[in-house]
Image (tube, grey):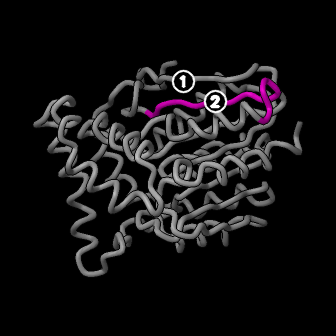
Amino acid sequence: MKTFDGLRLDVRTYGPETAPVTAVLSHCWTLNQADWHYQVRDLQREFGHGIRIVTWDHRGHGDSEGCPKDACRISNLARDMSDVIDTYAPNGKLVIAGHSIGGMTTMVLARQRPELFDRVVGIAFVSTSSGQIDTVTLGLPEMGPRIRAQIPRMLAFRSRTLTKRARRRAPVIERLVIRRFLFGKPMRLVDAALTVEGLINSSGATVVGFYEDCLLHDAVDALKVLDGIPTQVLVGTRDVLTPPAHARRIAENIEGAVLTIVPDAGHMLPLERDELVSGVLIRLIRPHL
């Protein structure tokens, strides 16, 4: 499909458009819809064609079209998400899951289109934040802010100066970043490889543009739109990008939200704790079938 500003998005659907419930899964920064591949598998096993699942690659990610840095904005991701829902899930109930920037996108969508959430019967915020990303120290109180700023610039520099083939051959920096800052324990090599590939496929504009916009993200006001909607907020104890305090802030600002803090997990919960995340989605969906 095409976005409001003419970019091509890669969208995938599973199950019929006439299903009573659609699971809408919004992925994290620098990965793609494969972020949710375990959940797509588990939801299909559980419900078959009884539900619809919609995933897509955000602008500048995966197989969707790249965009200039000034178009790498969470507000644009929310407009894209709105159009994806209108096109591929125009009717019926919605369960929305957002991981990292995907969760931030969901919050901004609630601000942009609060009436859409009359159809939402469940929300999962996974390893995400409602704001204050600029205070995150990456678990390194002294050097954290400086390192936080240098990581996207370093990845963008590699994107500009090395081919994807060269980076795949020697992804030393990418592996270091994901091991130190994205995953907790244990870390499956297959999940690490998927995440490294996402970093390698992300352009410098995507990496830096969305990073800079995340620092400005502030959507606490939008959370009130979600009051009364069954909401699950999940975070790992080892998440240094969107730490437990950020998840707690989300849960405290949504009436009835349930917070789950996952021991030893990092930022990549849909991969690291796939059964847990899938179980949360199954429980949100089941009452509406």
Q: Please tell me in which quadrant of the rendered image residue 252 appears.
A: bottom right
Which residue appears at 28% of the width and 72% of the height?
A: 144
CB atoms of marks 1 and 2 within 8 Å: yes
The percent position of residue 268, horizontal first and vertical second, equals 48, 53
Q: In terms of sequence position, does the residue under pointer 1 or pointer 2 come before the other?
A: 1
Residue matched to label 1: 11
The percent position of residue 215, horizontal first and vertical second, equals 37, 60
**Mark 1 nearby-residue class (10 Å; few <14, some 14–19, many ≥20):** some
Q: Please tell me in which quadrant of the rendered image residue 147 appears.
A: bottom left
Which residue appears at 15% of the width and 33% of the height?
A: 166
Q: Nearer the viewer, residue 181 or 96?
A: 181
Q: Where is the C terminus found, in terms of image quarters?
A: top right
The answer to whether residue 287 of the structure is visible from this angle is yes
Name the side, left or right, on which 245 lies relative to 288. Answer: left
Name the side, left or right, on which 282 lies relative to 108. Answer: right
Is 42 magenta? The answer is no
The percent position of residue 68, horizontal first and vertical second, equals 28, 33
Measured in 3D between alpha carbons, the distance from the residue under mark 1 to the one under mark 2, in whole angstroms, is 7 Å
Q: Please tell me in which quadrant of the rendered image residue 216 appears.
A: bottom left
Question: Magenta segment, which residues?
Answer: 46-58
Residue matched to label 2: 54
Is 50 magenta? The answer is yes
Amino acid type of the residue that numbered disc 2 sits on in the rendered structure: Val
Q: Nearer the viewer, residue 98 or 182?
A: 182
Name the side, left or right, on which 97 lies relative to 157. Answer: right
Amino acid type of the residue that numbered disc 1 sits on in the rendered structure: Val
Which residue appears at 39% of the width and 43% of the height?
A: 195
Secondary structure under the numbered disc 1 in the rendered image? strand
Name the side, left or right, on which 123 lies relative to 99. Answer: right
The percent position of residue 80, horizontal first and vertical second, equals 52, 32
